[in-house]
Amino acid sequence: MNTTIDYEMTVIVPVYNEQVTLQELLKSLEEYRQRASVKVCFMIVDDCSDDDSKNIILNWCSMHEHFFFLSLKMRSGLTASIKAGIDEVKSPFLGYIEANLQTDPEDFELLLKKRFEASLVCGERDLSLIKNPLVKLKVKLFNFIRKSVTRDGMNDVTCPLRVGDTQILKNLPWFVGMQYFVPGFIKATGHNVINVPVRYKKRIYGRSKHCFFKSIFNGVIDLMAFIWLKNRYIETQIRSSNFISRED
């Protein structure tokens, strides 16, 4: 039985070689859980890490009942990790946070306040606080290109803090890099998206795993995929029916 159905929100946490940050992250998630306004659990998705991340996750989950884990069979990437988590979630709402300690779990409360007003609530950081000039340039350039095409109105689509309607997120046509285009797709299907200011923390441990030029190149390719799928995406709305649907 999938026990995430017993919670109001399941937070997906993708992990790849994060042994340096994991203990601190997991402690902060547990501290937030104890104070959260809704019943929340966490799904840690290990993307075939080759450091000690998996063991840390297994040990933590064995001692904390509100933490679950998925361990992917092979290295699959960030999008696949997110999608694997989404496929397993049964709670009505789904949260998302990354393991780099640059966002605060406590800020989920800011997003949860808006969860009934939109299908997706996205954190928005003050990008002027980003000190690394290459990172700042990458974020601004990618946001400019993306916004000019998707017209999704998002200023910080790379912010790793979100809360959304689980079923709507399950129904999206996921592809590599899709996490950056979720707001655009949700708006394109007639649903609402809200931005909420959240705190931004400077990276303390490790380095970003994303190469500047590769990120920009992949972003353009992903944008082309978004355009193609958006023009061919099918979503039907039933006016009436004599069927009574139920979930087994």
Image: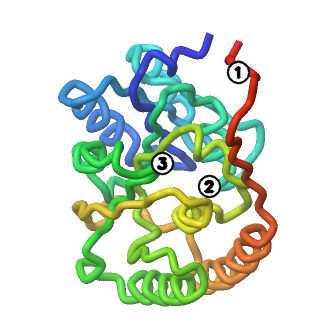
From the top left corner, tell me how far across and down residue 41 is, in percent: 41, 26
Per the rendering, the mark at residue 245 is 1
Question: Which callout, 2 or 3, points at the residue further toward the start of the chain?
Answer: 3
Name the one closer to the observer, 188 or 217: 188
Q: Label 1, label 2: how many angstroms apart (C-alpha)?
A: 34 Å
10 Å crowding of disc 1: few (<14), some (14-19), many (20+): few
Residue pictured at 45% horizontal, 58% vertical = 192
Q: Tag 2: residue type?
A: Leu
Name the one closer to the observer, 124 or 70: 124
Name the one closer to the observer, 67 or 238: 238
Label 3 close to label 1 by CB (< 8 Å): no
The nearer-to-camera label among 2 and 3 is 2
Q: What SS does tag 1 mark?
A: loop
Q: Tag 1: residue type?
A: Ser
10 Å crowding of disc 2: few (<14), some (14-19), many (20+): many
Give the residue pinned by disc 3.
Answer: 18
Position of residue 71 relative to residue 16, above or below, is: above
Question: Which callout, 3 or 1, points at the residue further toward the start of the chain?
Answer: 3
Position of residue 240 relative to residue 137, above or below, is: above
Q: Label 3, label 1: how many angstroms apart (C-alpha)?
A: 43 Å
